[in-house]
Image (cartoon, rainbow, N blue to C red):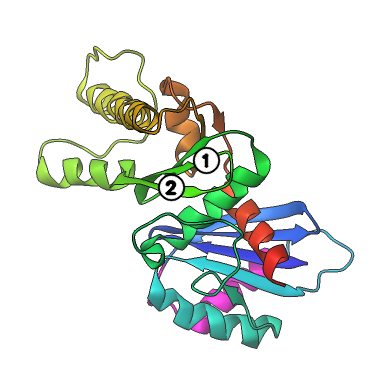
Amino acid sequence: MLLVIDVGNTNTVIGIFEGEALLQWWRIRTVADHTVDEYGMLILQLYSTVKAENKKVDDIIISCVVPPMLNILEPLCIKYFHVKPLIIGPGIRTGMPIYYDNPKEVGADRIVNAIAAHQKYTGDLIIVDFGTATTFDYVTKRGEYMGGCIAPGIGISSQALFEKASKLPRVEFSKPKSIIAKDTVSSMQAGIIFGYAGLIDGIVERMKKEAKTEATVIATGGLSVVIAPETKSIDKVDEMLTLEGLRIIYTRNR
């Protein structure tokens, strides 16, 4: 079986593949000051819940945008699974031309998403990943990564609102009944949810116009299921896109 690990700034998503089938996945917090053993025991505990006849981990692939986490995960893989992991970075075969001024600057998660989207969907694509930052990436129907843009994520945008406006409470990310809200909590939810949906639609519209394309828009990331229904531009939500991308890159390199 293949263990895939996608380390983001806020959350780490872990999945187990048997062949092309994703058996199980988990989302945990990214904590860079945990020890190898703390993370090791947590992942082993999660892994113990997998229902499969052969539960041996044959290989591991990691995508990481938090460099200190590699100092935890690499030793963890060797100590607890006896596997040296494959890490997304320079030298990894992706099969995708990257038309960025400096390809090394592109986050590993953005490339992984682009590869998975091109493999799973047809035509020009725009991938919107709702993470700590929200990224927008344009991939042509020929499988070329053309670039994109990065916006503050809905979580950190809302966090700034809670911290800087002392009378405003923290609220959950849920859709209010109306954009013309009648109480403070609903007013904040309306501004956060509908305002962020407008940001998504605005950026996607500009990208399509500049690229002269009617690209299919794929959303992924933890909050994609919350925001996507309120947008006009997102065509499909694929929460497991990054994990699928890691599996695809693994098959191209191992």
Mostly what secondary structure, the magenta segment?
A: helix
Q: Quadrant of the N terminus?
A: bottom right
Left or right, 199 with reference to 162: right
Q: Which quarter of the figure has residue 184? A: top left
Q: Position of residue 128 (x, y in %)?
A: 44, 40
Name of the residue lying farthest toward the right: 53
Q: Position of residue 203 (x, y in %)?
A: 32, 32
Secondary structure beneath label 1: loop
Q: Which residue is mark 2?
A: 146
Kind of residue at badge 2? Met
Q: Examine the rendered structure and indicate whether residue 153 appears above or below residue 250.
A: above
Is 59 in the magenta? no
Residues marked 2 and 1 touching at CB (< 8 Å): yes
Kind of residue at badge 1? Thr
Q: Position of residue 118 (x, y in %)?
A: 61, 44
Which residue is painted at 54% across and 35% down in the image? 124
The residue lying toward the viewer, choosing from 161 and 205, is 205
The reply to whether residue 152 is visible in this rendering is no
Left or right, 81 with reference to 213: right
Which residue is painted at 41% across and 28% down in the image? 212
Highlighted magenta segment, given as a residue range: 31-46
Secondary structure beneath label 2: strand
Q: Which quarter of the figure has residue 11? A: bottom left
The reply to whether residue 245 is visible in this rendering is yes
For disc 1, the neighbor class at 10 Å (few under 14, some 14 to 19, many from 20) is: some
User: Residue 140: which disc?
Assistant: 1
The residue lying toward the viewer, choosing from 132 and 38, is 132
**Distance between mark 2 and mark 1 Cα atoms:** 7 Å
Left or right, 36 with reference to 133: right
